[in-house]
Amino acid sequence: MVHLSEEAKKSIVEKALNRKGKGLAELATQYNIGYSTLQKWIFKYKNSVPNISNKSSANTPLTRSDQLKHLLATATLDETALGAYCREHGIYSFQMQQWKNEFMSIDKSEKKQETQTELRALRAENKLLKKDLLRKDRALAETTALLVLKKKADLLFGVLEDD
């Protein structure tokens, strides 16, 4: 049974996540570890379990704006420059690819839910505005009717001296 340091586990998991054409089984045999062990390490790494995660910024999730800033900063970099940038900022290249995919794909259900919520709010506001308009319209009609009645009363009975 081989005991590996946490850094060695991290590097193997990073290689597994950034593999190009290699299978997990091939990597597991290359490093003389079990296939299921490698899968377990990857699962723990993706779920940010403390024993196999980066101690710097990997534990603190970045905001969408920060993710976008990193993506824009690395858009024109080649692989070696990208690696240097990632090391400098405490992020991983597979995270960059994941963020890029998230930004590129539009979650239709999320967007649909947002539009439905916005539509509901607009309908409620429209209902309140119509209600307020109807109230004001009725008040105006009542005021107009009172003025007309006062003019008719003045014509029938004459203008009172008190007014």
Image (cartoon, rainbow, N blue to C red):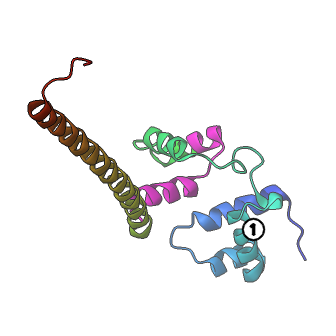
Q: Depth check: give the residue in front, 1 or 150.
A: 150
Q: Residue 82's spot in the image, x, y percent?
A: 52, 45
Secondary structure of the residue carrying tag 1 is helix
Q: Quadrant of residue 17?
A: bottom right
Query: Compared with residue 144, is residue 29 higher up or lower down, i.e. above or below?
Result: below
Label 1, on which residue? Answer: 44
Q: Residues within 10 Å of mark 1 (few under 14, many from 20)?
A: some
The residue drawn where x is 52% and y is 47% is: 64
Q: Residue 132's spot in the image, x, y percent?
A: 33, 47
Q: Depth check: give the residue in front, 148 or 102.
A: 148
Query: Compared with residue 162, is residue 71 higher up or lower down, i.e. above or below?
Result: below
The residue drawn where x is 46% and y is 59% is: 102
Task: Determine the residue located farthest toward the left in the rendered image.
Answer: 155
The amino acid beneath tag 1 is Lys
Magenta-colored stretch includes residue 102: yes
Magenta-colored stretch includes residue 53: no
Taking the image as shown, residue 74 lies to the left or right of residue 5, namely: left
The kind of secondary structure the magenta stretch mainly shows is helix
The residue drawn where x is 56% and y is 74% is: 22
Q: Depth check: give the residue in front, 64 or 16.
A: 64
Magenta range? 84-107
Q: Depth check: give the residue in front, 99 or 73.
A: 99
